[in-house]
Image (cartoon, rainbow, N blue to C red):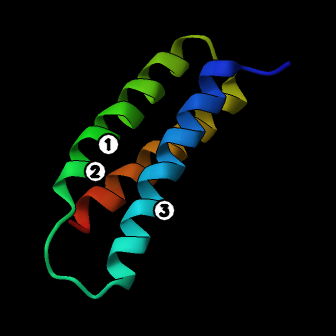
Amino acid sequence: MGNRLFQKAREAVNNVVEKMNSHSMQHDNSTPQHLSAHDEAVAQNAISSAMANSSDAERAQLAELQQELDQNGELK
């Protein structure tokens, strides 16, 4: 079946990345704070929750997701 918390974390981070990418494609200088603050918090919580119940391989992937989330946060 797979680790449901891991899947949720991956989906949440992908959601943030997709929204940030679509926002940057609009060539708008304003930051989409309404989406990024809430969505980033959801993604961060999902990553934290998934860490406790993950295998070593999943934790390594979660660390990569965290890094991706951090990089997108810097783009704001």
**Residue type at the position of mark 2:** Leu
Depicted 48 relative to depicted 30: above or below: above
Give the distance between the C-alpha atoms of the residues marked 3 and 1, in whole angstroms: 12 Å
Say which residue label 3 marks.
Answer: 18
Give percent across and percent down for residue 58.
67, 30
User: Percent from the top left, x then y, of residue 37?
Assistant: 21, 44
**Tag 3's secondary structure?**
helix
Q: Amino acid at mark 3?
A: Glu
The quadrant of the image that shows the N terminus is top right
Residue 65 located left or right of residue 39:
right
From the viewer's perspective, tell me whether residue 50 is left or right of residue 25: right
Residue under circle 2?
Answer: 35
Q: Is residue 3 left or right of residue 65?
A: right
**Is 39 or 55 nearer to us in this picture?**
39
Q: Is residue 59 above or below residue 75?
A: above
Mark 3 Cα within 10 Å, few/some/many (few <14, many 20+)? few
Which image quarter is the C terminus in? bottom left
* Residues marked 3 and 2 touching at CB (< 8 Å): no
Tell whether label 1 touches label 3 (CB within 8 Å).
no
Write down the residue under mark 1: 40
